[in-house]
Image (tube, grey):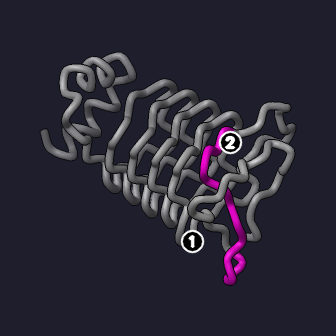
Amino acid sequence: MTETDHVSLLRQGKTAWSAWREANPSIHPDLREANLNGAHLAGALLRGADLGKANLSRANLTGAILGGCDFSGADLSGATLSRANLGRAILRDANLSRANLSEANLGAADLRGRTSVSRILPERPSPMPISAGRASVEPSSEGRTSAAPGSARPISAERTSIGLI
């Protein structure tokens, strides 16, 4: 299946996509540079997909299974990622500005590089912390944010602005 076929199948909706993924669990979908701006992908099974440099701005990824996905250089600005599983996801140089990550699992996620994470929480923070596992956000010398490998401090939902962008 080609990259174009993967994007076409994903645009058919969650049911068609999930059925294909369950029938083809060993295939890592190639969605690099896909334009999924504003896509409704709530609950989608995207585990292990390559979404490098994809446009997912304003996409609804609520509760999506995104563990192990490669989002290097992707635009996730304004995306809803609440309750999404981003465990072991690669978010290097991704734009997460204005993204909603409330109750998202970021365990062992890779946020190195120039990952933009300013104001990643909703206007009214929920009392539930974001499950960050071993990932945490630290300011770099350039005023950008990056993960501190091996850090155990979780990202707290009490913060309304993470990053210095």
Question: Split into 4 quadrants, where in the image is the C terminus?
Answer: bottom right
Q: Which mark is residue 128?
A: none
Asked which secondary structure carries label 2, the reply is loop
Q: Which residues are magenta?
A: 131-143
Residue 8: say if magenta.
no
Q: Amino acid at mark 1?
A: Arg
The one nearer the camera, 141 or 122, is 141
Q: Is residue 120 left or right of residue 115?
A: right
The one nearer the camera, 107 or 77, is 107
Q: Amino acid at mark 2?
A: Asn
Q: Residue at x 74, y 64 (%)?
A: 163
Q: Quadrant of residue 28?
A: top left
Asked which secondary structure carries label 1, the reply is loop
For marks 1 and 2, the one nearer the N-term is 2
**Whole-percent x, y for residue 38 in the image:** 52, 40
**Whole-percent x, y for residue 144 in the image:** 67, 73
Q: In this rendering, is residue 18 above or below 127? A: above
**Whole-percent x, y for residue 129 in the image:** 76, 37
Q: Is residue 100 left or right of residue 124?
A: left
Q: Quadrant of residue 11?
A: top left
Kindly identify which residue carries mark 1: 114
Kindly identify which residue carries mark 2: 100
